[in-house]
Image (cartoon, grey):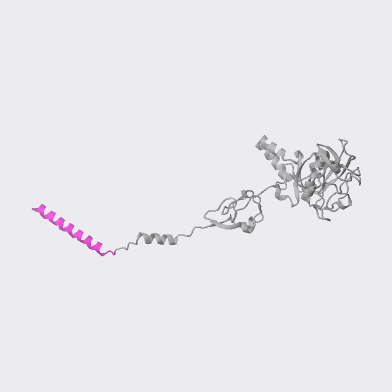
């Protein structure tokens, strides 16, 4: 009987507790639940926009070897920066393309021309000549220097009437490269050379050989900037004579006056009437016409007749009944046939 009363009392207490809990839960306010779509929209609105980067693009197809103009370029945008690209068109205006590029293609540094060709002025050509210490100012010539090129000619074949002589061949020619050093890759200073020599000894023999090859005293070639019409003169002089480079001060701009001397006749002569009267051949035409060694080596006023107007006068035939003549070249031998 007592047990029954105790269980009944516990159930009453439990019922009162559950009722109290239910009453408390009924008093708490309900929290509003936002829609999932609205919450994601608010998060997207708070996110910052992605940063874009400018990049130079090709506006129209460009051929290889073409100088870039403003019409060839335009600015585009990329989500990430591109290595070796350009952010401004001004940085590439006037540069020359190395390969053909299609429209809308990004422009990279490797697409543009580099090298010694960009150091040559219009109307000049870069020409390499073999050198030795005794003919190159004791290897004191450096890239960017100006030199006078002297030639010593000697008629060893006996086919010309020229005497052994030396004269100035090219005045104030700019040195573009001397050995492995060039105006784009200048030689190191004395302090840099000492540091490099010390470093090369620590790194090993391969590094030492590379450093020794770059030293000026180990140079065996020099690259000169030569006017186009003088290329054949330098080529003939190097083949048949001895060249000497005389180092000169860069402020010394004195040049010889070619009008005081007879002009050298060309190997090829323009056809009569093709060149307007009173006009001279252009540099490219003179280079195409070429030069003979016997004319380069000739001395005296009668050996090289002066050009008048367009071309050299045609030599008169020894026979009065013949009006014209032609030269036949067979190797180094030259034969004149009249007709």
Q: Does the magenta portion include 4?
A: yes
Asked if the magenta segment contains residue 167, the reply would be no
Q: Which residue occupies the foreground of this view, 324 or 280?
A: 324
Position of the C terminus by quadrant: top right
x, y percentage for residue 111? 62, 49
35, above or below 121, in the image: below
Front residue of this view, candidates 189 and 331 = 331
- Judged from this view, the residue extending furthest toward the front is 321
**What is the quadrant of residue 333 in the picture?**
top right
Residue 218 percent coordinates (x, y): 75, 38
Q: Position of residue 277 (x, y in %)?
A: 83, 55
- Where residue 68 appears, as percent x and y from the top left, is 64, 55
Region of the chain picked out in magenta, as a range: 1-29
Look at 11% across and 52% down and name the residue there: 3
Residue 257 makes an appearance in the image:
no
Q: Quadrant of residue 24?
A: bottom left
Residue 207 vs residue 164, the one in the foreground: 164
Res 128 visible = yes
Left or right placement of residue 100 versus residue 277 in this view: left
* Secondary structure predominantly adopted by residues drawn in magenta: helix
Q: Nearer the viewer, residue 300 or 255?
A: 300
Total numbered labels placed on residues in the image: 0
Q: Residue drawn at (10%, 53%), measured in percent from left and top? A: 4
- Residue at 58% across, 58% down: 75
């Amino acid at each position: 009987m007592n047990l029954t009363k105790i269980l009944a009392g516990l159930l009453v207490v439990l019922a009162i507790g559950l009722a109290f809990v239910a009453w408390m839960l009924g008093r708490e306010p309900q929290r509003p639940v936002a829609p999932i779509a609205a919450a994601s929209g608010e998060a997207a609105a708070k996110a910052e926009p992605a940063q874009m980067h400018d990049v130079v693009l090709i506006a129209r197809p460009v051929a290889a070897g073409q100088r870039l103009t403003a019409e060839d370029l335009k600015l585009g945008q990329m989500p990430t920066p591109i290595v070796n690209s350009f952010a401004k068109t001004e940085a590439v205006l006037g540069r020359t393309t190395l390969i053909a590029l299609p429209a809308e293609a990004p422009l990279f540094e490797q697409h543009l021309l580099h090298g010694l060709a960009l150091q040559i002025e219009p109307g000049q050509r870069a020409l390499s000549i073999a050198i030795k210490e005794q003919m190159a100012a004791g290897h004191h010539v450096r890239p960017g220097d100006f030199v006078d090129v002297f030639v010593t000619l000697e008629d060893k074949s006996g086919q010309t009437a020229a005497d052994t002589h030396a004269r100035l061949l090219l005045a104030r020619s700019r040195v573009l490269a001397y050995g492995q050093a060039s105006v784009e890759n200048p030689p190191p200073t004395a302090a840099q050379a000492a540091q490099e020599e010390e470093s090369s000894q620590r790194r090993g023999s391969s590094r030492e050989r590379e450093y020794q090859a770059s030293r000026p005293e180990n140079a065996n070639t020099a690259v000169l900037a030569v006017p186009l019409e003088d290329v054949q003169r330098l080529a003939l002089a190097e083949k048949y004579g001895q060249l000497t480079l005389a180092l000169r001060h860069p402020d010394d701009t004195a040049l010889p006056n070619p009008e005081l001397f007879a002009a050298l006749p060309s190997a090829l002569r323009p056809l009569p009437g093709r060149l307007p009267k009173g006009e001279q051949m252009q540099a490219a035409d003179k280079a195409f016409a070429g030069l003979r060694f016997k004319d380069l080596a000739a001395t005296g006023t009668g050996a090289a007749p002066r050009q008048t107007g367009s071309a050299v006068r045609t030599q008169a035939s020894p026979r009065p009944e013949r009006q014209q003549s032609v030269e036949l070249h067979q190797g180094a031998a030259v034969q004149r046939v009249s007709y």
